[in-house]
Image (spheres, grey):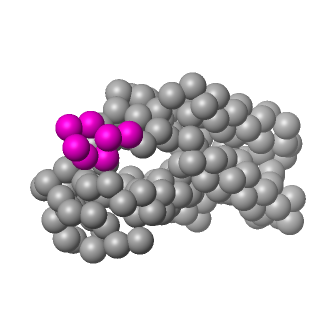
Amino acid sequence: MEILSYALAGLVLVWVLSRQFSGRFVSFRRAVVLPVVLVLVGLDQAYNADIRWTGAAVGVVVLDLLLMVGLGAARGAAVRLTERDGYLYQRGGWPLLVLWVVSIGARVGVAVLTTGDARAAAATTVALSVGVSLAAQYAVLSYRVRADGRPLRPGARDRRGAVAGSRLDP
């Protein structure tokens, strides 16, 4: 189960990083789906794992999730928002890359520095951790996009299901 958890997280990270650094027009279509799926997979893995959920195990997971929320929020603030062809465009730069390296390093550190039940819990909740981190990143980015006020590319839908192309309400 541990290998599956790491493989899933690795594949998701490669896909997410490639999208964040290649740049694209802002769209809310998939911003919710991936974090929700990862959180659900992570919760399922944690529930079905053969782990003793001691106080230390729960504590490590809670601290890890809090750390990932903070780093995800910082990454959401680091995404560059510019205008391209008259529409809001997002792309990652050096600050985002550094924050991703810190995020991955922090997650690896949690797994390496813990022992026993806490290590097993940390290893089992990788998908949950990545999902929570991405949710925090997308939440901050969504807030920034709404506050920005520049138009979204026509055809892109926001969370309300409205077709973008006009300025978003702050």
Name the residue at 14% across, 54% down. Answer: 154
Name the residue at 65% across, 56% down. Answer: 69
Q: Is residue 4 visible?
A: no
Residue 1 image position (x, y, % from top left): 55, 44
Identity of the residue furthest to the left in this view: 155
In terms of depth relative to the viewer, which is nearer, 153 or 160?
153
Residue 77 included in the magenta stretch of the image: no
Name the residue at 73% across, 52% down. Answer: 67
Taking the image as shown, residue 162 lies to the left or right of residue 50, namely left
Residue 170 image position (x, y, % from top left): 41, 71
Taking the image as shown, residue 154 lies to the left or right of residue 10, namely left
Name the residue at 25% across, 46% down. Answer: 87
Q: Is residue 96 visible?
A: yes
In terms of depth relative to the viewer, which is nearer, 146 or 44?
146
Residue 51 image position (x, y, % from top left): 71, 57
Tell me the chief SS of the magenta region.
Answer: strand
Residue 83 included in the magenta stretch of the image: yes
Q: Quadrant of residue 14?
A: top left
Residue 140 image position (x, y, % from top left): 53, 57
In terms of depth relative to the viewer, which is nearer, 136 or 94?
94
| Image: magenta residue range | 82-88
Taking the image as shown, residue 101 lies to the left or right of residue 24, namely right
Q: Is residue 93 above or below residue 85?
A: above
How many tags in the picture?
Answer: 0
Taking the image as shown, residue 43 lies to the left or right of residue 168, namely right
